[in-house]
Image (cartoon, helix red, strand yellow):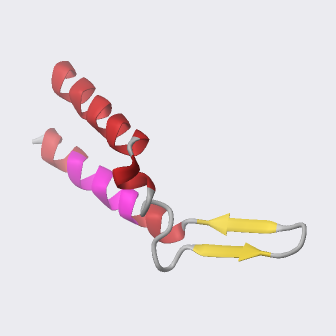
Amino acid sequence: MLVIVGSAIVVTGLLLWSDLVRNWLGRLPGDIYFKRDNFTFYFPIITCLLLSLLITILLRVFKK
């Protein structure tokens, strides 16, 4: 189980490091982004919800 979890972490890290995921993760429709003169506000709410859903599904699959 430790090897599987470690491998999943490595694969996730490689995907996040590559340009494959970097171009769309955090820039989904529904993410809040405001940019003014000296102020930038960014809240990736949809990205957070999708990641939470994915982690919940993975934990439920590995729990059984």
**Rendering coords of residue 57 (x, y %):** 22, 54
Which residue is farthest right? 38
Which residue is farthest bottom? 30
At a point 47% along the width and 61% down the height, the residue shown is 48
**Residue 44 placement, left or right of 40:** left
At a point 74% along the width and 67% down the height, the residue shown is 41
Say if 3 sits above or below 8 in the image: above
Q: Is residue 61 magenta?
A: no
Say if 46 sits above or below 60 in the image: below
At a point 29% along the width and 56% down the height, the residue shown is 54
Residues in magenta, as a range: 50-58
Q: Quadrant of residue 1?
A: top left
Report the front residue among 45 and 35. Answer: 35
**Residue 46 placement, left or right of 35:** left
**Rendering coords of residue 16 (x, y %):** 40, 44
**Which secondary structure class fits the magenta region best?**
helix
Check the picture and name the quadrant holding the C terminus: top left
Q: Is residue 51 magenta?
A: yes
**Residue 60 placement, left or right of 53:** left
**Residue 1 placement, left or right of 12:** left
Report the front residue among 61 and 17. Answer: 17
**Rendering coords of residue 26 (x, y %):** 50, 62
Report the front residue among 12 and 49. Answer: 12
Task: Give the number of callouts.
Answer: 0
**Rendering coords of residue 61 (x, y %):** 14, 47
Which residue is farthest front? 19
